[in-house]
Amino acid sequence: MRNEQEMLDIVLNTAREDERIRAVYMNGSRTNSNVPKDIFQDFDIVYVVTDTASFIKDKTWINAFGELRMMQEPKKNDVNRAMNVDFTKSYAFLMLFTDGNRIDLTIETKEVTFDAYGIDKLTIPLLDKDNLLPAIPSPTDLDYHVKKPTKGEYDHFTNEFWWCSQNVAKGIWRDELPYAKQMYEYTMREPLDNMVSWWIGMQHDFEISTGKLGKYLKAYLPESYWKMYKETYSNSDYTNIWESIFATCELFRTLSQEVAEHFNFTYPIDDDRNMTNYLKRVRNLPSNAKGIY
């Protein structure tokens, strides 16, 4: 597997040899000193080009990066919007190579660069043939730090969590596994993960990132809380799903109360008690029940 320097050399040599490419910059995790390096990190590269059409029409220039295992062109695959997508301003090639390296390469015109360059604070310039890239500060992941919750956000997600729990319970009782699982993951998981992130943020003065989709939660949760968090995931067995629901409720309750205390919010204890009792009731409800109560 080619190392980071070898890959960057290929990226830059390709740009130097192609007159259509006027500048190169990189963003993403490889610009973030707080992210541990590993073999799966992508190379998020942007080529500033004179035009996009020639790169899209003839893709032989991609061969310089190595042998492809697979490639995706997101704008090309966006079937529902294909007729309205403007390929002339920017276009992306997501490339996985046979040695395991991956490059997410975007080509964009100077006009796009002038508007977008530096908005993502995790950006570093790599090549600038025409001195068109303005000076920007050193890369920082500040924009990705956990943000302090407002009272409105806290109230919304605590309400959402307990309200939506009934839909999960209903799906289990009806033996509607896809509905129950997706209701759980899409309506209870988000409030839980937000609460976990806020709690972690509290421990670090909100100067930390929990990563995309919470990928760093394990690194920042105490072992006891991480154990509880793992138990929020279930298989397709309804007994296991019920156990994961109550584990989720316990973790959510614990962290929500600590967040509420920290920010002087009010935890909806009545909703918690009422819906916990409801969940216990539905769990023990016979499949032929004629009424919930």
Image: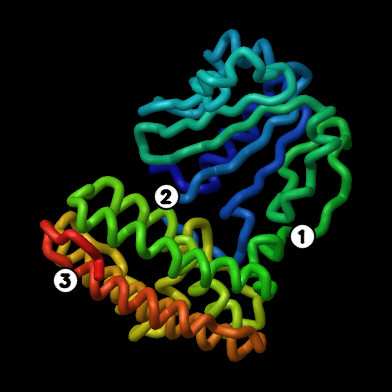
Of residue 259 and residue 16, the one placed in the foreground of this image is 259
Residue 70: x %, y % from top left:
39, 27
Residue that numbered label 1 is attached to: 138
User: Label 2 sits on what residue type?
Assistant: Phe
Percent of width and height locating residue 195: 51, 73
CA separation in Å, label 1 and label 2:
24 Å
* Amino acid type, residue under disc 3 in the picture: Asn
Q: Amino acid at mark 1?
A: Ser
Please rate how many residues cluster around mark 3, counting C-alpha atoms within 10 Å: few if below 14, some from 14 to 19, many from 20.
few
Callout 1 touching callout 2 (CB < 8 Å): no
Circle 2 residues within 10 Å: few <14, some 14–19, many ≥20: few
Q: Which mark is residue 284?
A: 3
Q: Residue at x 67, y 27 (%)?
A: 107
Q: Earlier in the sequence, mark 3 or mark 1?
A: 1
Q: Which of the numbered marks, if any, corresponds to residue 180?
A: none
- Dot 3 and dot 1 residues touching (CB under 8 Å): no
Whole-percent x, y for residue 46 in the image: 67, 35
Q: Is residue 135 left or right of residue 93?
A: right
Q: Secondary structure at mark 3?
A: loop
User: In percent of the image, x 67 and y 62: which residue is there?
Assistant: 141
Residue at 88% x, 44% y: name it: 134
Separation of disc 3 and disc 2 at Cα? 45 Å
Quarter of the image where the N terminus is located: top left
Q: Which structural element holds mark 2?
A: loop
Q: Is residue 4 above or below residue 53?
A: below
Decide which of tag 1 and tag 2 comes sooner along the chain: 2
Q: Is 134 placed above or below 199 here?
A: above
Q: Which residue is mark 2?
A: 40
Q: Residue at x 22, y 72 (%)?
A: 243
Residue closest to the eye, 128 or 286: 286
Residue 131 x, y percent position in the rendering: 88, 36
